Amino acid sequence: MSENVTLPSVTEEPPPRPAPARFARAEPGRALRLGLVRTGLETRMFFREKDQIAFVFSIAVVMLVILASIFTTRYRGLDVTVSQVYAAGLIGTGIMAVSFQNLGISIAVERDLGGLRRLVSTPMPPSAYFIGKVGSVFIVAVIQIAILLGIGVAFFDLELPSAIGPWLTFIWVFVLGLASMTMLGIAASSVPRSARSATAVITLPFVVLQFISGAFIPHTDLPDWLLNLSAVFPLKWLCQGMRSIFLGEEAAVLELTGGYELGRVALVLAAWTVGGLVLCLLTFRWKDNRTK
Amino acid sequence: MTAVRVRGLHKRYGDVVAVDGIDLDIQRGEVFGLLGPNGAGKTTTVEILEGYRGRDSGEVDVLGMDPGKAPNSWRDRIGVVWQSTADTPELTVAEIIGNFARYYRRPRDPGQVIEQVELTEQAGKRVHALSGGQRRRLDVALGIIGDPDLLFLDEPTTGLDPEARRRFADLIRGLAAEGTTILLTSHYLDEVETLAGRIAVIARGKIVAEGSPKTLGGRATAVSTVQWVGEDGLHTIETDTPAKAVADLYAKSGEVSGLTVTRPTLEDVYLKLIGADDE
C-alpha cells in the first residue's frame, strides 16, 4: 500500500527556518502575564464545572443554612447566638473549601488525566501555572465570602463591623488564611494516586478539620483537648480570626483562652503559608503517577 | 542537519531495563517512525527526547540541546502531541488552542491551525462534545500551535476509525511537507509504513533494525518464494535470484499455471525482528 505514497524524506531539504532567538532564562514579566492569562482560564473552567461548583463552592453555604437554622440558642449573658458563631466560623470552611479542597482534588485530577504533562512540555513558565491557581482561587474565595456574609447578615443576625479596624483585620486574616490553605491544597494534590481516589483522599482531612476546629461544631461545645489538637492546623486559627471580626470583643470570653489571640492567629497562619510553600516546592510533581 | 542524535541511551526502572543502549539519528525534515510492540521502550525513549523523563546514561541531543538541561525557550521549538484532552472538558476548541498559543513566543495563527486540523465547525464546541477523531486532531493542534521544528507523535491514531486515520495521515503529511521534522511511534505497522520515510524497529529496549519501509530488515534482498502449479501439484522454491528461477522454469517447462513470486511482507520482517515467532 505504500507504493503510491511519496513522502518528504532524507533526500528532501526542509524549507529554511528563522534561527531561534535567544531568550533570557528568567522572565518575571512573562510569567506574570501568562499567570494572569491562566487566572482567567482557571476561573472560567471552575465556573463551568457544575459538579465542582456544587461540591466545592456550596458546601459552606449549605452547612451554614442547615446548622445556623438548627442551632439558634443565645449564649447566657451575651448578645451572641449560636447561629452567629456558625455564620462567622463557616467563613473559614468556605475559604478552606475553595482553596485546599478545590486545589487538592482538581490538581490531582489534572495530573492524572495528563493536563500537567501537556503544560510542562510547552514553554509556559511553571510559575505561571501557580499564579493562575492562586489568582482563580482568590476570585472564587471573594465570591464565596460575599455569599456567606450575605446569607449570614440576611438570615442569621450576623453584623458587619462598622469600624475600619475589624475590616483591616479581616483582610489579613482572609489573605493569610487563603494563602496557607492554597499552599496546603497544592501540596496535598500530590498525595492521591489517581483521579478516582482524589476526592476521598482530600475530603477526609477536610471534613475532620471542620469538626475539630470549631466550624461544624461551635468551638464552645468542643472539649479542650480537641481544640488543642486542632490548634496545630490552620483552620482553627482562621475561624478564630473570623469570629474576632464578626462577633466582637464581648464574645471573646467564649474562646478557650478568653481572647482571640490575633497575634497567634497571624503567626500560625503565616507559618503554615511558608511551610506549605516549602512543601510545594519540595514535593510538587508535574509527572503523573505512572511516570517514574 | 541533524534534529535528533542519540548515542548509548540507557534507562531502567528498578530492575526492569526499558532502554538498553539506543543510537538514533534523525535528520531535519525527516518523518521518522519508531516501531515496536508495547513495552519495547518506544515511549520511554520519546519521553527522554522530549525532556519529560530523565535518563540513566547516554548522550542525547535534540535541536542542538540536551533535553534534560534545555532552557524554557527550547520548548518553543518542539511540539508534543499528547493523548486526550480529558483534563479540560469544559473549554471550547478555540479557547484551548488560543490559550496554548499564548504560551509560545512565535505561535502559529490559532484560526489557521484550527482550519488545518479541520475543526473549524467545532471551534465553538466544548472538548467533551468532540468525537474521538476530533479530539485527536485537537491534540495535534496543541502540538503544532507553537510552530515547532520537531514534532513528537506517540501512538497517534490509536482508537481512530479508518476514515479518521486516513484524514490524520493526510494532516501529518501536510506538516511534513511544510518541513516539520516528525518523530512518530507506533505499534501499528501500516501506520508507520504509510507515514514514515525511515523506520527503526525497537524491541526489548534495543534498535533491532533501521531502514526505509522497502529495505527494512533486508527486505529488499531477502529470499523470495517462487511457486507454481505443475502437473503433479504445487511446487515451491526459495531463492535469492527469483528472476533467474522464473527464466529457468520457463526454459524447462514453458508457461506454467499459478505462478507467483513473493517477498516477505513488511509484517513478516517486523514479526521476525521483534522475535514474535519465538514466543
Image: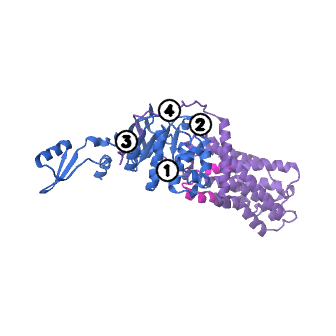
Using the rendered image, report if marks 2 and 1 lie on a common chain: no
Question: Which disc number belongs to residue A159?
Answer: none
- Residue density around tag 2, few if under 14, some if 14–19, many if 20 or more, within 10 Å: some
Question: Chain B is shown in which shade?
Answer: blue
Give the left or right position of residue B44, taking residue A131 as reference. Answer: left
The reply to whether dot 3 and dot 4 touch (C-beta < 8 Å) is no
Q: CA distance from mark 2 to mark 1?
A: 32 Å
Q: Chain of mark 4?
A: B
Q: Nearer the viewer, mark 3 or mark 4?
A: 3
Q: Amino acid at mark 3?
A: Ala
Using the rendered image, report if marks 4 and 1 lie on a common chain: no
Q: CA distance from mark 3 to mark 2?
A: 32 Å
Question: Chain A is shown in which shade?
Answer: purple
Q: Amino acid at mark 4?
A: Met
Farthest-out residue, bottom: A70
Mark 4, secondary structure of its residue:
loop
Q: CA distance from mark 2 to mark 4?
A: 19 Å
Residue under label 3: B200
N-term mark: 2 or 4: 4
Residue A264 visible to an observer of this rendering: no
Asked if residue B123 is among those painted magenta in the image, a careful observer would answer no
Question: Which disc number belongs to residue B65?
Answer: 4
Mark 2, secondary structure of its residue:
loop
Mark 1, secondary structure of its residue:
loop
